[in-house]
Amino acid sequence: MKKIMLLAGLCLILALSGCQQKSGIDQTARNGNGTPAVNLPKIEEVSGEDVGDTASGNPSDEVVEIKEKMFIAQANDIFYNAEDYLGKTIKYEGIFTVYEEPETGNKYYAVIRYGPGCCGIDANAGFEVLWGNEYPSQNDWVEAVGILEEYEEGGNTFLRLALSSLTVLPVRGAEYVSQ
């Protein structure tokens, strides 16, 4: 009987430790505010066949497509691991929006989706975009394709997509995403 209880306890421990690995949360690492640090998987691990190289096999030709199902996780992975994605083409759909800096009057353009929050649009996921042509209207649903680049402004470094295409689409995807 003791052996069965010991075996059952060992199986329970193994099962619980396996669940921690699947959750993506490192129980030992902590952020500065004491919350668990999340280990986000690389986009290639999340999307599998959605991410692929062109025929040349050149990493700069790689197109990283951010899909609706894991939108926030994929966008976060790009921000947290920017050095892995700089110079790569990013493709995704979202809401075209314009932000105006009140102090300077500078306009910043972005393609975003709304994330979770208490009031609907507390958090946005997406990227600032730079486009050499006429921008679409505020709130248009677009497909953005561009090269991820860094730029400096006011002593800070930011990421944006230098767009090769910005297409208004007739059908909207999910404006609110939770993953």
Image: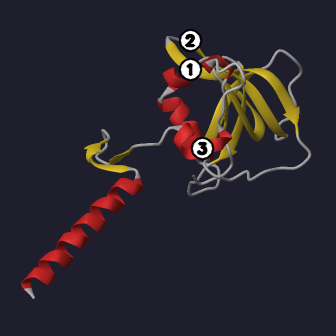
Q: Which mark is residue 158?
A: 1
Kind of residue sitting beneath label 2: Glu
Q: Residues within 10 Å of mark 2 (few under 14, many from 20)?
A: few
Q: Position of residue 51 (x, y in %)?
A: 64, 36
For the residues labelled 3 and 1, the Cα–Cα distance comes to 28 Å
Relative to 3, say whether 33 is above or below: above
Number of the label disc, if any, that sits on residue 152: 2
Is label 1 in contact with label 2 (beta carbons under 8 Å)? yes
Closest to the observer: 57 or 18? 57
> What residue is drawn where x is 66% and y is 25%?
62
Mark 3 or mark 1, earlier in chain:
3
Quadrant containing the N terminus in the rendered view: bottom left
The answer to whether mark 3 and mark 2 are in CB contact below 8 A is no
Residue where numbered disc 3 is placed: 48
Kindly indicate the quadrant of the structure image that contains residue 158.
top right
Q: How many marks?
A: 3
Residue contact at pointers 3 and 1, CB within 8 angstroms:
no
Q: Of tags 3 and 2, which is closer to the observer? A: 3
**Amino acid on which disc 3 is placed:** Gly
What x and y, as percent, mark residue 79?
Answer: 53, 30
Establish if 38 lies above or below 160.
below
C-alpha span from label 3 to label 2: 33 Å
Q: Which mark is residue 167?
A: none
Helix, strand or loop for disc 2:
strand
Q: Secondary structure at mark 3?
A: helix
Q: First in sequence: mark 1 or mark 2? A: 2
59 horizontally vs 8: left or right: right
Whichever of labels 3 and 2 marks the residue nearer the N terminus, that label is 3
Q: Is residue 30 above or below residue 78?
A: below
**Residue farthest to the right?**
170
Colour pattern: secondary structure
Q: Amino acid at mark 1?
A: Phe
